[in-house]
Amino acid sequence: MKKFFLLSSFALLCSTSFAQINVCEVDETYQDSTAGVYPKPFQEDLGTGGIPDTVCLNTDYKTVLNVVISEAIEIGGTAINVNALTLDTVIGLPEGLVYECNVPDCSYTPEDKVGCITVFGKVTNADFLGDNEITVQATVSSLFDINIEFPNPLIAPGTYSVYVKEEGSNNCTEYVNTTELETSIDNLRLFPNPASDMITIEANVSEAANYTCQIRNILGAVVMEQNFNTVAGPNTITFSVDQLSNGMYTYILTDGQAALSRKFVVQK
């Protein structure tokens, strides 16, 4: 039977070996979103949401959740003023995965607007193969403390799951140290986001090179791929997403040695 882990007990795993993998950047896409955790939980009837990155055994892994905090949230039809929202723990992650927030003590205030949480590590125990449902537990500080969970039928219905596959399986998310690529690519952005028809990816590149751009769906499957040559300076690549269903996608830019990835939404 699968074990459940409170990740706070694994804080010692966050050593210097994770100096890059545990770093997250806030996704500005959620700047004006309602309070909650993003991507939103997976809803089977809609076919959207959930954690898009799949784990392979014995492979370094990383995925990012974004936290949106506002001055008030609505729980069960009641508006509650918010002084702070603190992530307490994540329950259900496979053994070997831990998390780290981009702020001390994982405590966010309305002034922060958006924060991010990196889930990272390496799963080596085959007991965790398959679907691992997780729950994010947090505390809302108001006139009194309120314990909440995500997913939550009153706030964000659905499920969060981390899916673990056999080592070497297709469509797994493998963490690659992006330091080298980040030094050669600047101002990477995609627009519009959300997108309904065409997307444009722009980047400034320090020198001419050959790159591949992949679009992956929430299951990690490659739904689009295009090779292109860059020139030193501004570069643009355009995709049609007209054939894609609504939902969260990841675009990955790689030179074969390192990779940069960002998420975007298709909404028609």
Image (cartoon, rainbow, N blue to C red):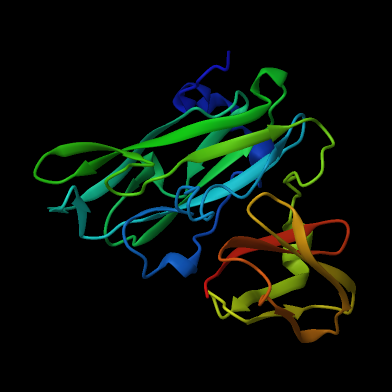
Quick check: 7 above or below 235?
above
Percent x, y for residue 42?
49, 48
x, y percentage for residue 242? 66, 77
User: Can the viewer see residue 16 in this picture?
Assistant: no
Residue 252, image x and y in percent? 73, 62
**Point 80% across, 78% down: residue:** 206
Determine which quarter of the picture holds residue 222: bottom right
117 with respect to 54 (left or right) = left
Q: Name the outermost residue toward the front.
A: 45
165 relative to 138 in the view: left or right? right
Which residue is found at the position 68% from the left and 26% from the top? 129
| 205 or 65, nearer to the observer | 65
Q: Nearer the viewer, residue 14 or 241?
A: 241
The residue depicted at 81 percent of the width and 57 percent of the height is: 258
In the rendered image, the residue lying farthest to the top is: 1
Residue 21 vertical position relative to residue 227 in the rendered view, above or below: above
Q: Is 116 situated left or right of 247 in this image?
A: left
- Quadrant for the N terminus in the image: top right
- Where is residue 177? Give x, y as percent: 75, 50
